[in-house]
Image (cartoon, rainbow, N blue to C red):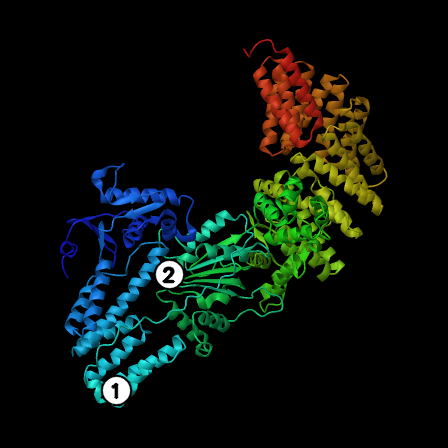
Amino acid sequence: METAQGEFGGGGLRLRVLGPVTAWLTDRQVNPGPPLQRATLWVLAAQAGHLVTKDRLIDALWGAAAPKTAEQSLYTYVAGLRRLLEPERGRRGPFTVLTQSANGYSLARDACRTDAEDFEQRLAEARRFQAKQDLPAWLRELEAGLELWAGPALGGLPGPFCEAERARLESMRLTAREDHADALLRLGRHQESLDALTALTAEAPLRERPRELLMLALYRCGRQAEALEVFHDTRRLLAEHLGVDPGEPLRRAYELILHADPSLGASPSPAPVAAPEEVVRPRQLPRDPQVFVGRTDTVVRLRALLAPWDGGEPQAVVAVTGTAGAGKSTLAVRAAHTVSDHYPDGQLYLNMLGATPGVGRLNSLDLLGRLLRGLGVRPEAVPSDPDEAAAMLRDRLAGRHTLIVLDDASGPDQVRPLLGLPAGNALLVTSRESFAAADDCVQLVLGRMQRSESVAMLAKLVGAERIAADPAAAAELADLCGRLPLALRLAAARLTENRHMPLSELNSRLRDERRALHELESGDLAVRASLQLSHDVLAGSGHELDRAAAAALCHLGVPHVPDATAEVVAALLDVPLDEAERTVARLVRANLAEPGEHGRFRLHDLVRLFAMELAERRLSERDRDDALDRVIGLYGTTARLAMKLIDPHRVHPPHEFAGCEPFALTGSADASTWLVRERPNVLAVAAQAMASGNQCLAGSGAHLAFSFHWPLVYTAHNLDIVTLSRKALEVGDRLDDQGISALAHGYLAQGLDHSGRYEEALLHQRAEVALRRTIGDPFSRMRALGNLAVMLTSLKVHEEALSSAREQLRIAREIGAAVGERHALLCVGSAQLGLGDVAAAVAACTEMESLAREAGDAMHRAEALMGMAEVHLVQEDHPSVAELYEKALVLMRENRFRGMEPRCLGRLGQAERLMGRFDRARAYLLETLAVAEKYGAAFWVGFAREELALLDGGRAAPDG
């Protein structure tokens, strides 16, 4: 072969594309730029002398997957090519080689010469010599043309245009090699022809003309038996891979060789160049969806995987997974249309029937058969063995770029025969099952749409004016539909059927959990039916884990909680935790549960409603009550364990919960975290149980609320205390259970007291004391008296408060309740201070602080410090007030006790104001206001505002 310089002799740019793309300018090699810039040069060079519009260029480079920046990128590539072609022109030109018009660009006809043009000219010359029967010249031109090749055409160049050109040039090359072998054979150079044909048939085993020539070459080399064997091998190969019989020329050659026909000894007259065999290019995609909104990030991600911007090979398998109704199929079809130009050999589409009611899913042979028939294989030629059919499919797809869309696959196992297709082809799969473990697969999990996207979808389906008339209702409707496309379509169908129905009316219907799924139906299409199928597939499976997952979904409809953990599933099913963990993982893989952080998961809103219906239909009332009681036991025992780890000194009322293994908690920090995370679930389960008609369950729900009282006190969720306690009080009245009623009155009083509603709190606390004087144990009576003293002190009824506190102290010492004694001393000190006996107040608080320190009770120590601070406040010793409240605040924060933060911060702000440190005072008071508003501490909200008003009105000078 000639040197590169000699090969590209002459001026101007020489572009080599029959192999790795390189460029030469006069006598030196130059860099034509990045792949897309090289592709731009080839598009222009292939149409040199003609105007190529910007739109055609963009389509040639990116097809339907053009990015928003395509036009700007095109300017960049053109500028780079101009610097290459006319470096002396600078940045502004004028340019004469690569010129621009209003609509596009044109490369001067003689500006660039390519080896592809040389190759095509050599083939044209070869055909001319062939027609003249000048066999040596025919061979010479073919060899000269083939010597120009150095690898696959347009190596590394991306874009639809280059893909099509690559296929065209490669087809011409194969034909030229066939002609070359034919010419050698006609010239009597049989062994050289045999060597060339052996290599060619190995590279393209299904092309018939090289095999016909190979048979003739073998025959002329005296190897008749081998020539006949080639025919038999060819017939078997074509049948296995293409499902066809050998063509007439091949069969005729076999007959001639079989009978050693004398005509084979001489070279026949040159035959015309055979046309390449016809290739079927299927276009099976469903219509591009007309109503498609949102999912922009996912569509861009799919395009990047299936049609990489750099022109590289596509991802072998891309799976779009998600729950029923998430819009997986519509998204896949849209994405397939956007990248169809990158798959010039066709797009195949199959519904895998993985979740189609009443229809069996496609088996491996059905799947392979449909794909092969789509590629042109006759039905009778499709192998009956799945492995052979898969091999035929791989052979048919070799060297091609075909996109296969498999919609609604039951899981990775159903598509396993298609894994490992030749490079350049891609599978786009949709499924309700996870594909995370599939080989060479990228999975995109489709969740709910954004609210704005959901509203836009409703506007397209119902009409923009109707949606714009009530945007708040439209946003609520989107949320009530879970922002899932299927539910949104069904809601839109409801509105379309009744053009006069306000959005708010449909919203009202959907808020009713009992009828929400009934509203989301239209004909045979329904959210319920779609979810039912997912459940039934698991329930009817031969795998025990699948059946366990179906049972878990059913039982998860029992507790009405925002999210859950494997521990909750273990309680619901009454199974070991490790078994429950595997069951939850199976639900997640089936996209019936959405994984969250810290081992948590949740059911999509509509899946949760379906699970509730499922529980009503599939479980007896007793089974539902027993399952919920086990969850109450799980939460109740864990709440008490958590508080024991955080503060072992707090006392819970006795109750025997259903036996359940509590959550595994490793320390106080872990316990605090668990209480925060589980609070919404505990509140929901307690409220649900207390509303039950089952008396035992209602009682357990009340005791769950009582067990969570101290966690709520610690975190200052006073409104939750009030709400739960009122429900518990209703349970006590309904069951005529004085023990529950007494506890409910007492806890309700504490919640009201912490919220600053002192008079109302006192009424409920007196009610508890009255009940405790007739029922219950001395400890409960002691505790009730102490809480009464606290509330009387808040209302400045000090004499009665002192009497109640002294009675509390007596009982505590009689029964040996150290925690009660400490609390009673605090109450005595507060009452004495209110009555003006400072010395007695100091003595009580000092004794309490000493006992608390000795017991290691941080909460009581903090309360003792605050009691001493109140004494110093009366004495107007403001530095001591600030010092003691700061110590108390540190203790509370170290022990995660938020309940008394507003008081500490408020008093600190007051003390700082009285000391003239106004900036510090303002900072404390603003923090008091924020914390008190957050925790619903009305008294301290008012206190902070009054102090800030005094600060603003009385500040005369800055801090000194």
Let me know if residue 862 appears in the view.
Answer: no
Residue 793: x and y in percent read 76, 24
Q: Quadrant of residue 389?
A: bottom left
- Which residue is label 2 attached to? 424
- Which residue is label 1 attached to? 225
Q: Quadrant of the C terminus?
A: top right
Q: Residue furthest top?
A: 956
Q: Secondary structure at mark 1?
A: helix
Residue 251: x and y in percent read 32, 83
Decide: is 782 above or below 589. above
Label 1 environment density (alpha carbons within 10 Å; few <14, some 14–19, many ≥20):
few
Instruction: Identify the mark nearer the N-term, 2 or 1.
Output: 1
Q: Nearer the viewer, residue 80 or 127?
A: 127
Q: Nearer the viewer, residue 130 or 149?
A: 130
Q: Amino acid at mark 1?
A: Ala
Let me know if residue 137 appears in the view.
Answer: yes
Residue 373: x and y in percent read 46, 72
Q: Quadrant of residue 816?
A: top right
Q: Quadrant of residue 925?
A: top right
Decide: is 208 above or below 529. below
